[in-house]
C-alpha cells in the first residue's frame, strides 16, 4: 500500500474520524466543563457584586452540576432522534447564551434560570451526546482509551480555566468576564462539534440526517469488485425484510408504511429510554443505589479540603497547593485508566468497589493526619480514585449491562451520581453547621464510602447471576446480539464488512 493511501485511511477514513471526534470532545469539555468547574473563582466576586451569602451562591453552582448529570434522561432521546452533532451544538448555544444573559442580571436570584438551568442543560447536552458518540465509534477496541481521553477534558479544563477565569476577572470585572467566556465557548464549541459524525458502519443508534452520506463514503473506499458483494448483500437483506402480503404493492403503499414506521420510531426514542426489563433487574437497581451513596461523599475533598486544613494550622496557600495536587492526580488517573483499561486481566467493573474501598480507608486515615506532607499523600490517593470513578462510569456501565442497553441504563447511571453530587455538599454543610467539627464529616464520608463499596460489589455479583441480556458472538466478521426493546427480544445479526484498498 502506498504512503498516500495509508495517510488517507489513517486521517480521512473511519478510524481517523473516530479519533478526531475523541480529541474534539476533549477540547469541547475543556471550555464547557472547565468554565462550570471554575465556579469557585467567581464566588467572592458574586458575593461582592450582589451582597448575598455564600450558601445562596453555593446552591447556584450545585444545581448546575446536578443538571449536568440529571438531565441525561432528557438529552438521550433527543440525540437518538436528532443526532449527536445537533444536540451537542444546541448545548453549546445554550451554554453561551447562559453566560451572556447572566452578565445582565440585576439580581442574583435570576441566576437560577440564566445560569443554573440554562448552563446545566447545555452542559448535559454537550456531555451526554458526545460521550455516547465516542462510545459508538469505539464499541470494542480502544473503548477505555477513547472514553478516558475524552473525559480528561473535565480535569484539564479545571486546571486551565481556573487561572484563565481569575486573570480575566482581574482585568475586566465580573460581567465582562461572562461575555468574553460566552464568545470563547461559542467559537470553540461550534468548531469542535461540527466534527461530530456518526460511525460509518451504522452502529450509532441515531436516525438523524448526519449519517445520510456514509453509505456513499463506504462505496467510495471499496474496490470495484467489492461493489457486487455489497449490492448482493443489500438485495439479500431487502428480500429478507419483504413478506408475501406486501409483494406487488405500489410505491405509494410503501411510502405510507415508511411514514408510519418513522412516526413509531420517533416515539420509541423516548419510550426506549424507560424499559421495564431494565427497571425490574435487581443488579441495575442496586447499581443505581450504590452510585448515589458513592457520590454523596465524592465531592467532599474538593469542596471542604482547604477550609479543613486551616483548622489543622496549615496556611491557606498550602491548602490550595494540596487541592491542586488532587486535581493533577485526577488528570493523571484519567490518562492511566485510558492506557491500562483495555488491558486489564479482570473486568473493569471491579475497579469501582476497589476505588471506593481505598477512598474509605484514605478518608478515615485523614483523621490522623496533621502535617502538610500527609495531606499531599491523601490528595494523591483521593485524586486517583476519583478519576477511576469519574472517567470509567460509561465504560463500566456498557460492560455490565451491554452496549445494546446503554440508552436505557447510562442516563440513570450518570444521573444517580449527579443526584448524590447535589445532595452531598448540602448534607456536609448541614453536619458541619450542627457539630462545628470536620471529624464528624470524615466519619460519615468514610462510612458511606465503605457502604458504597459493598453495594457496588453486590450489584456486580447480582448482574453476573441475573444478566440484563445474553450476548453471544459467532464467527469473526459477524456479531449476534439480543437487542431488547420493551419486553421483546430480537436476535439481530450485525454484518461487519471488511474493505481493502490497494
Image (cartoon, rainbow, N blue to C red):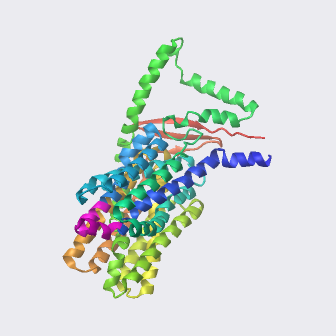
Which of 59/250 is in front? 59
- 492 shown above or below 146: above
Q: How many marks?
A: 0
Residue 478 image offset from top left, x and y in percent: 62, 40
Which of 493/197 is in front? 197
Residue 165 image offset from top left, x and y in percent: 42, 66
Q: Quadrant of residue 458?
A: bottom left
Which of 481/376 is in front? 376
Residue 465 image offset from top left, x and y in percent: 43, 53
Identify the residue at the far left of this view: 434
Which SS type dominates the magenta stretch?
helix
The magenta stretch spans residue 279: no
Q: Quadrant of the C terminus?
A: top right
State whether residue 329 appears in this view: yes
The residue at 49%/18% (across/down) is: 254
Q: Quadrant of residue 443?
A: bottom left
The magenta stretch spans residue 58: yes
Residue 28 image offset from top left, x and y in percent: 49, 55
- 239 shown above or below 435: above
State whether residue 402 appears in this view: no
The residue at 40%/29% (across/down) is: 264
The residue at 52%/19% (across/down) is: 243
- 407 shown above or below 453: above
Segment tinted magenta in the rendering: 42-61
Identify the residue at the far right of this view: 2
Which of 220/344 is in front? 220
Amino acid at each position: 500500500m502506498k504512503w498516500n493511501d495509508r495517510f488517507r485511511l489513517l486521517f480521512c477514513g473511519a478510524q481517523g474520524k473516530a479519533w478526531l471526534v475523541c480529541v474534539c470532545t476533549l477540547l469541547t469539555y475543556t471550555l464547557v466543563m472547565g468554565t462550570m468547574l471554575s465556579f469557585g473563582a467567581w464566588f467572592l466576586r458574586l458575593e461582592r457584586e450582589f451582597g448575598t451569602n455564600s450558601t445562596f451562591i453555593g446552591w447556584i453552582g450545585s444545581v448546575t452540576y446536578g443538571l449536568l448529570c440529571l438531565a441525561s434522561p432528557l438529552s438521550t432521546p433527543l440525540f437518538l432522534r436528532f443526532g449527536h452533532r445537533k444536540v451537542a451544538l444546541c448545548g453549546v448555544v445554550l451554554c453561551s447564551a447562559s453566560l451572556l444573559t447572566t452578565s445582565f442580571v440585576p439580581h442574583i436570584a435570576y441566576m437560577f434560570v440564566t445560569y443554573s438551568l440554562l448552563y446545566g442543560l447545555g452542559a448535559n447536552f454537550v456531555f451526554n451526546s458526545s460521550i455516547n458518540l465516542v462510545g459508538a465509534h469505539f464499541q470494542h477496541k480502544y473503548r477505555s482509551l477513547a472514553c478516558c481521553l475524552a473525559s480528561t477534558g473535565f480535569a484539564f479544563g479545571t486546571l486551565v480555566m481556573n487561572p484563565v477565569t481569575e486573570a480575566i476577572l482581574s482585568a475586566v470585572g465580573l460581567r465582562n468576564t461572562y461575555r468574553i467566556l460566552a464568545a470563547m465557548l461559542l467559537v470553540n464549541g461550534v468548531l469542535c462539534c461540527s466534527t461530530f459524525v456518526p460511525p460509518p458502519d451504522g452502529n450509532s443508534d441515531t436516525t438523524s440526517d448526519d449519517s445520510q452520506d456514509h453509505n456513499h463514503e463506504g462505496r467510495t473506499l471499496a474496490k470495484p469488485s467489492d461493489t457486487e458483494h455489497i449490492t448482493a448483500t443489500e438485495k439479500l437483506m431487502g428480500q429478507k425484510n419483504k413478506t408475501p402480503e406486501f409483494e406487488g404493492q405500489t410505491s405509494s403503499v410503501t411510502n405510507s408504511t415508511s411514514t408510519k414506521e418513522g412516526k413509531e420510531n420517533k416515539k420509541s426514542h423516548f419510550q426506549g429510554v424507560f424499559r421495564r426489563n431494565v427497571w425490574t433487574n435487581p443488579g441495575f437497581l442496586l447499581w443505581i443505589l450504590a452510585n448515589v451513596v458513592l457520590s454523596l461523599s465524592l465531592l467532599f475533598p474538593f469542596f471542604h479540603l482547604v477550609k479543613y486544613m486551616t483548622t489543622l494550622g496549615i496556611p491557606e496557600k498550602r491548602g490550595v497547593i494540596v487541592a491542586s495536587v488532587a486535581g493533577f492526580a485526577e488528570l493523571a488517573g484519567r490518562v492511566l485508566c485510558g492506557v491500562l483499561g483495555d488491558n486489564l486481566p479482570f473486568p473493569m467493573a471491579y475497579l469501582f468497589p476497589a476505588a471506593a474501598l481505598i477512598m474509605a480507608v484514605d478518608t478515615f486515615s485523614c483523621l490522623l493526619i496533621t502535617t502538610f506532607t500527609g495531606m499531599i499523600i491523601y490528595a494523591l490517593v483521593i485524586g486517583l480514585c476519583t478519576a477511576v470513578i469519574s472517567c470509567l462510569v460509561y465504560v463500566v456501565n456498557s460492560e455490565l449491562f451491554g452496549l445494546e442497553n446503554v440508552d436505557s441504563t447510562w442516563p440513570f447511571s450518570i444521573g444517580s451520581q449527579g443526584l448524590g453530587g447535589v445532595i452531598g455538599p448540602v448534607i456536609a454543610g448541614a453536619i458541619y453547621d450542627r457539630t462545628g467539627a470536620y471529624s464528624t464529616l470524615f466519619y460519615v464520608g468514610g462510612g458511606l464510602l465503605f457502604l458504597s463499596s459493598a453495594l457496588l460489589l453486590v450489584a456486580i455479583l447480582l448482574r453476573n447471576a441475573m444478566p440484563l441480556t445474553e450476548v453471544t458472538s459467532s464467527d469473526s466478521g459477524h456479531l449476534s446480539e439480543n437487542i431488547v426493546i420493551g419486553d421483546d427480544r430480537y436476535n439481530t445479526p450485525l454484518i461487519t464488512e471488511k474493505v481493502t484498498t490497494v
